[in-house]
Image: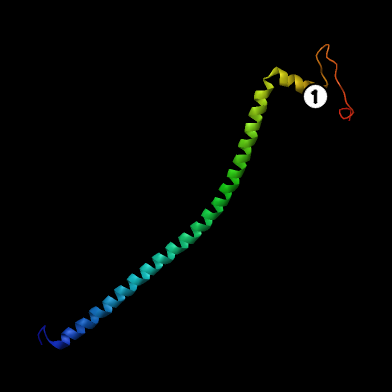
Amino acid sequence: MNRFSAEEKGNNHKASAAGAKRRKFIWILVVALFFGWAGYIFFAQSAVIAEKSGQLAKKKESSESVNTSLGQLKYEVSRLKDDEYVGQLARKWYNMYPEGELPIRTEQSGK
């Protein structure tokens, strides 16, 4: 028989078809494993990102409150540089009055 006979051609075709099926199966298996791994990583990272986003939101709220209190403190410090304001605080908290000034007390201030 020569190389162009039908029997040899059929046997060779069956062997190459089995190899092609095997390669195709291995390729599909590799692709499926890759997509499985990629899906797992995606969902794992999305959970971590959601957790980090929550932490970031809390820290932003904290930062805003700290910045607000910092602004108030800076305003108080700037007011403490004014002698008139310091005098008002001394009168109010410590009952300190300049010489010659008589405090006016009402019934409410005595409580």
Residue at numbered disc 1 = 92
What sort of colour scheme is used for the picture?
rainbow
Residue 92 image-quadrant placement: top right
Q: Residue at x 49, y 61 (%)?
A: 43
Name the secondary structure under disc 1: helix
Q: Position of residue 48 (x, y in %)?
A: 53, 55
Quadrant of image for the N terminus: bottom left
- Packing grade of label 1 (10 A; few <14, some 14-19, many >=20) is few
Residue toward you, 21 or 1: 21
Please state which of residues 106 and 23 is positioned toward the viewer in this rendering: 106
Residue at the top extreme of this rendering: 100
**Which residue is painted at 66% across and 30% down in the image?**
73
Label 1 amino acid?
A: Lys
Residue 34's place in the image compared with 68, above or below, is below
Tell me the quarter of the picture where residue 33 sits.
Answer: bottom left
- Asked if residue 8 is positioned above or below residue 98 in the image, the reply reads below
Q: Residue at x 65, y 28 (%)?
A: 75
Query: Which residue is painted at 58% across and 49% down in the image?
Result: 55
